[in-house]
């Protein structure tokens, strides 16, 4: 029930020692609570003086208050630990995502990461609040009470000793079944999260292609499967709770009958029988509480395991194999025997397999292919966002094993499908690559990107605040801000475009084309697209198919024979793309 990796979290061992001490005190308080209550009842039954009844009742009230004070202290300590530790785990997770970047998102899934960092952390916090307290109660309170019961009546102690293993065995069988169901259900929850987030991101494209209703049916199917799995898990959870309540109640009933018969036969005094009967429910209570909360903690345990798996992934930080250099018209890149596969795919399923590729100077290189052909994976690999499994790479004769190099990424500007803008002013967003840029330099970059007319309509001009992710401005203006970033970063001579106009209408794309063509000058341009008119602007074209380069060459060369290029162009025209 407890993941061993919990003990590597700071403060866990100290917490367990504190809880052990408090729980042990609580066990003795419960014991004395039962003892004093039994004394008062026995003295009352035997019609002893009032003083002999009042004294144990006062002591009962004192230990009753102490029990709740210890419980309150215990709860406060655990809540403090749970809150602090869950936030530390969240920080570690976000730091891991930040350092690993798109490589981890590609493998794990953005929906999974969002779920883990939001809902997952809440589940973990609840898991911490429940598991430590319940586990300590179950480990320490029953043994203390059982020893005292043995001292009062050996037969009663033996009865309770026999019942508990039977209950635990039955609960283990049901618990394993519930855990298997919960593990499967959490995986389905992760799939649903990835589906939902991907659908949300791609909604404009799905609507444009008329596929939104079809994808809505897909989401319904996945969510309905999640509902069905959840109900199956709940059935087992309810069954196990019922079984435990029935077994413990039956155990107490058997003990009560046994003690009643003993009293009738005068085989032992009233006090041992009564104190045993009072403490028997307390003896079973920690086990019942643990079982009741077991199913509530399963999702937290699964979420913690999922996050630990992410945190345990090796971090591929930016390397420094590449010496500082300046990209110019004589620069050259060679890529040979590059292979990359996403985690979780079959061993024979290669997501990227490039035999040979050469890039040089200020070429304009178009990357085309059907959806899922590997365009984005190739773009991300060249951008250094994904580290290949193996590759022979050379930049200006400097041999490297990946593009994840600090000096390489300092020379490139990346323009994705969906530009990311920060919750800041327009000027600060433009100055992303050059935070120290002057006002005149920012205005000049904005002019080159065709932003001045739009900014002139804003009350605060360049100081206008925009929402995170570009909320408050249109997709076309977001792309213009991205272009302004590239114009301002005039010391970066490598441009990587990953279908930057995919979500724009034709009119907006046409308006952006002129500033983009101006930006192409004196840059190595790597442009992934599915729009035909961009291919005419390229010097060289790479045709991707199933993670491999099907063809490469100038548009004129590829048009001379009926190969993969011509077939793709024909299909794209037929699909009106």
Image (cartoon, rainbow, N blue to C red):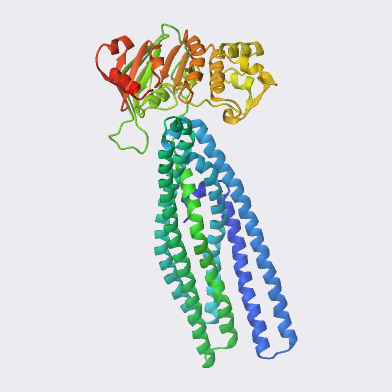
Residue 211: x and y, percent?
A: 41, 35
At which x and y percent is residue 83?
61, 48
Residue that appears at 63% across and 19% down: 427
Residue 271 appears in the picture as rendered: yes
Q: Quadrant of residue 392?
A: top left
Question: Above or below — where is 23 with respect to 389?
Answer: below
- Compared with residue 65, is residue 552 higher up or lower down, i.e. above or below? above
What residue is rendered at 59% in x and 63% in y? 23
Which quadrant of the rendered structure holds the C terminus?
Answer: top left
Q: Nearer the viewer, residue 221 or 466?
A: 221
Q: Quadrant of residue 230?
A: bottom left
Residue 357 shown left or right of residue 133 in the figure: left
Q: Tell me residue 104's x, y (percent).
A: 45, 34
Q: Is residue 392 above or below residue 109?
A: above
Viewer can see residue 395: no
The residue drawn where x is 61% and y is 57% is: 18
């Amino acid at each position: 029930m407890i993941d061993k990796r919990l003990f590597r979290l700071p403060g866990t061992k100290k917490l367990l020692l504190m809880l052990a001490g408090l729980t042990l005190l609580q066990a003795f308080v419960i014991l004395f609570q039962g003892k004093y209550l039994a004394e008062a009842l026995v003295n009352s039954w035997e019609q002893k003086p009032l003083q002999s009844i009042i004294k144990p009742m006062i002591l009962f009230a004192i230990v009753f208050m102490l029990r709740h004070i210890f419980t309150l202290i215990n709860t406060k300590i655990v809540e403090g630990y749970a809150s602090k530790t869950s936030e530390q785990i969240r920080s570690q997770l976000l730091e891991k995502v930040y350092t690993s970047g798109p490589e981890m998102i590609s493998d794990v899934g953005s929906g999974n990461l969002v779920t883990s960092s939001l809902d997952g952390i809440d589940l973990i916090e609840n898991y911490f609040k429940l598991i430590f307290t319940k586990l300590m109660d179950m480990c320490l309170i029953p043994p203390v009470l059982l020893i005292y019961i043995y001292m009062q009546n050996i037969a009663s102690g033996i009865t309770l000793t026999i019942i508990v293993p039977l209950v635990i065995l039955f609960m283990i069988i049901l618990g394993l079944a519930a855990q298997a169901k919960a593990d499967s259900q959490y995986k389905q929850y992760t799939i649903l999260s990835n589906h939902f987030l991907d659908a949300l991101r791609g909604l404009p494209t799905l609507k444009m292609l008329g596929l939104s209703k079809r994808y809505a049916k897909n989401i319904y199917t996945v969510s309905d499967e999640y509902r069905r799995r959840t109900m199956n898990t709940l059935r087992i959870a309810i069954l196990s709770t019922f079984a435990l309540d029935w077994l413990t109640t039956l155990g107490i009933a058997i003990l009560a009958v046994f003690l009643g018969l003993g009293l009738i036969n005068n085989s032992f005094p009233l006090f041992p029988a009564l104190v045993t009967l009072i403490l028997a429910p307390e003896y079973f209570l920690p086990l019942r509480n643990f079982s009741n909360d077991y199913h509530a903690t399963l999702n937290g345990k699964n979420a913690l395991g999922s996050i630990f798996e992410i945190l345990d992934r090796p971090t591929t930080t930016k390397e420094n194999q590449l010496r500082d250099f300046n990209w110019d018209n004589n620069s050259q890149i060679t890529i040979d025997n590059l292979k990359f596969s996403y985690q979780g795919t079959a061993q024979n399923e290669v997501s990227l397999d490039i035999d040979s590729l050469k890039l040089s100077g200020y070429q304009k290189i178009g990357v085309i292919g059907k959806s899922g052909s590997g365009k984005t994976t190739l773009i991300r690999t060249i951008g250094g966002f994904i580290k290949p499994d193996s590759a022979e790479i050379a930049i200006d004769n400097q041999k490297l094993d990946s593009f994840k190099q600090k000096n390489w990424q300092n020379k490139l500007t990346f323009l994705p499908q969906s530009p990311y803008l920060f919750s800041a002013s327009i000027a600060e967003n433009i100055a992303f690559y050059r935070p120290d840029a002057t006002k005149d330099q920012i205005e000049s970059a904005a002019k080159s990107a065709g932003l001045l007319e739009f900014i002139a309509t804003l009350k605060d001009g360049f100081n206008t605040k925009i929402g995170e992710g570009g909320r408050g401005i249109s997709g076309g203006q977001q792309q213009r801000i991205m272009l302004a970033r590239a114009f301002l970063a005039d010391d970066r001579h490598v441009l990587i475009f990953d279908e930057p106009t995919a979500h724009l209408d034709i009119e907006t794309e046409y308006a952006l084309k002129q500033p983009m063509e101006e930006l192409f000058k004196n840059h190595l341009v790597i442009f992934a697209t599915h729009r035909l008119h961009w291919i005419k602007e390229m010097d060289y074209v790479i045709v991707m198919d199933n993670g491999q380069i099907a063809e490469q060459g100038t548009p004129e060369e590829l048009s001379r024979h009926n190969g993969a290029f011509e077939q793709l162009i024909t299909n794209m025209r037929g699909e009106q793309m």
